[in-house]
Amino acid sequence: MSLHPMIAALRKHKAGVVLIALQIALTLAIVCNAIFIIYARIQNVQRPTGLDENNLFLITQQWVGAPSGDDPASIQKLDAMLKEDINALRAMPDVESVTPINSVPLFQSSWNGAMSLKPGAELRAGNARTTYYFGDESLMKTLGLHLIAGRNFTAADVTNKGFRDPTEANLVIVTKALADKLYPHGDAVGKVVYLDGASTPSTIIGEVERLQVPSVSSWASSFVWNSTIEPVRLNANFSRYAVRTKPGRLDAVMRQIPSTLYGVNPMRVLDDDSVKSFKDIRAEAYRADIGMAALMGVICLILLAVTAAGIVGLTSFWVGQRHRQIGVRRALGARKIDILHYFQLENLMIAGGGALVGIALAVGLNRLLMSKFEMDSMPVYYVLVGLAVVVVLGQIAVFVPARRASNVPPVVATRSA
Amino acid sequence: MFGYYLDLAIRSLKRSPGLTALMILIVAFGVGASMTSYSVFRAVSGDPIPWKSSRLFVPQIDMWGPKGRLDSTNDNEPPNAMDYLDAIALMRDHRAKYQSAMYAVSPSIVPPDAHMHPVNVGGHAVYSEFFAMLDVPFKYGSAWSADGDAQRAAVVVINAKLNQKLFGGNNSVGKTLDIDGKDYRIVGVLDNWNPKPTYFDVVNTGGFTSDQEDIFVPFTRAIDVGMPNNGNTNCSEIPKGSGFVGLQQSSCVWISYMVQLDDKAAVTAYRNYLDGYFNDQKAAGRFNWPLNNRLRDLPAWLESQHVVPSDTKISLVVALGLLVACLVNTAGLLLAKFLRRSGEIGVRRALGAPRLAIYTQFLIEAGMVGFTGGVLGLLLTWVGIHGISWVLPKEIASLARVDVSLLALTLAVAVIATMLAGLYPTFRASRVQPALQLKTN
């Protein structure tokens, strides 16, 4: 089929053509950026934390009128209270493992610093940023971490200190990501590091495969996998415990927690948020990401529907307008399929033209979002996917009016308009 | 004439119900999606204290110097909070009309009712001027006096919600409250004050949080009893001392600071004072880097701390894009619809109707589509705002709501936008050559 008559026909209604093309361009620009946002969020949500997340929950509680934790005697008092709680929790039926802990992955509260290979470095200029987890010898088992080199802490390694005590542990376990950053030859176990600009060394005794940092915010994105575990019970007026239950017993154990802990010591705060399953922690951490993906999805759907409806509407109008001409073409020997193809090809040309503009708009919108809102650069294939989507959408939308056009009988040619 | 055109428009729209319905739906969805996003944006970006925000300022002092900057950021921004030493020095010098250092606390409270378990509350340790500076509304009683600050008085101001929970909403002024095992006398009950964002301390609250501000205690008292801070603590070096006292002696920042300065002269004077303070400290050997202070007013401060979540802005940009796409679509459909009636236009023009009449007639028709789309869009906005609370973080979702101004804005956006979309089609319609149309027919 020659394109010349088609282009000549399109020039008769330039404005309509330009408007459809512009519509397709905008659709392409918005849809591929939205899909890019959706994909980035889903990828974020799906990354594993390194934990065995089933049958795991976290307790946060605060003692009322607890000692200040500013002097050695009161720290020992707090530590005794913490150990009482731990023992009571470990004695519960269906509890597999318990560790005191300062935070868990995806739980926003975090303790961050930097590691360096030299003593006394500036705190913020170490070799690698890291987050710290403080727990006892049961931490690995309770969180379900995979030790890939070295050894776990023993009960003898575990010490305790006040919440704001700046002394660092002698022994640490680090994630593989952090170990490889500090010692790229894969021989970090047994080597020393200096935590937070300390002048005394700490020895790496083990490596875990993966352990995410608590924060999912953008400020932590540069060191998401850099975690350090210290064999320390932190003593403050509050405490957190991670608890692993026997499979399927999570809810039952969680319900028992308030009565168990009040039984140990009633002068404490346990509220609605105090006992939280890891599933809930995950859902809360990623609520905003999932919400954003859903919102972008809805906007995409509305936009695609609107664009399709617009194409149907405008093409229908053109078919009505050219009713007689179609009849003439049919009378002169054009087959139904020729008429159908004519409208399909016409739409392809308009959509193609619009899509070319749309590619530029899509890249422009991505640049705008990058410069203003810390978005990443959109890979080229998103634009190509968007291109395919709008062209296919155009073809689907044009099919109905084009079919109607192809059904115009040749006899129309003989009637006056 | 208006009535006549309205009648014409209704007839015309009735003639092609499918196309009319399509246009209305498109306008409605475009307006509904963008107004839903806008309602969220409006909720989080609004000025929390519009009558006073230009007179509230946040001072920053560069007590860390260049070594305190993270390598990931290359701006020269000083720390966004204060260490204890400088906060106390600024309070002591007392150079602004009102000022308050503050830090977030989260103590436990033992309810007067012995059957209730202890509860955890949120709040701030502040100076007495905090309440006057931020126009905090009291239901019962009042703030403590400046003497209360100086004498480290064991007093507390509680918010309406906590008063409801503990005292059934009755006037509890003069009663005693057990905070962290120590007795405090209630001096004031707030009238449900819970501003969003929590602009007075975005550093420790992030601006939007589901935490309540339940209690306010004197800063000096909280320090005295060692009530620990509950929020961010940032250090450029590890504190030498241990415990909360060690934190107070360190250069770690954890205290928010706000001042009220009523006019330009006061701002200049305070700026000079801050610079002088820095230079004095430098002369004393504490700093060896150049002066790098900031004194931003509240709106600029909230902007610099990125209090409005970027997701909200991205959603608004994308939803406005959707609205534009919908309007381009509507313009195309209106064009088709108007030009289909070239014959009718030809007759009207031949009978003496001026171009202006054609303009009026078709713009009224476009406006009607816009208005109907707007009404439907309102409904969709309402659905959208309720739907969005399922997907947004709770603390933000609860802020978005439909009110009269959003209602009016939605209708106005729908009508004006559709009429804008109708401008070009109308222009084309008014250019129809009467002679040509009459001849072909």
Image (cartoon, coloured by chain):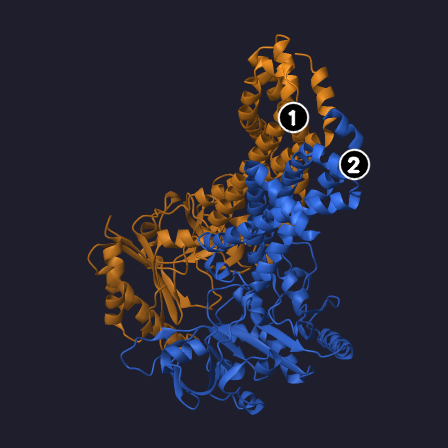
Chain colours: A orange, B blue
Indicate which disc residue B350 carries.
2
Left or right for A54, reference A32: left
- Measured along the vertical axis of the image, is residue B120 above or below residue B363? below
At numbered mark 1, what does the secondary structure look like: helix, strand or loop? Answer: helix
Task: Give the image location of residue B348, x and y in percent.
Answer: 74, 39
* Farthest residue, direction left: A93
Marks 1, 2: nearer the viewer: 2
Q: Residue at x 59, y 55 (%)?
A: B38
Left or right for B312, reference A137: right
Callouts 1 and 2 on one subunit: no
Task: Give the image location of residue B180, x and y in percent.
Answer: 39, 79
Residue closest to the eye, A87 or A44: A44
Residue corresponding to mark 1: A321
- Measured along the vertical axis of the image, is residue A198 above or below residue A190? below
Which kind of residue does numbered mark 1 sit on?
A: Gln
- Measured along the vertical axis of the image, is residue A345 above or below residue A109? above
Q: In which quarter of the image is residue A114?
A: bottom right
Crowd rating for badge 1 (residues with CA inside 10 Å; few <14, some 14–19, many 20+): some
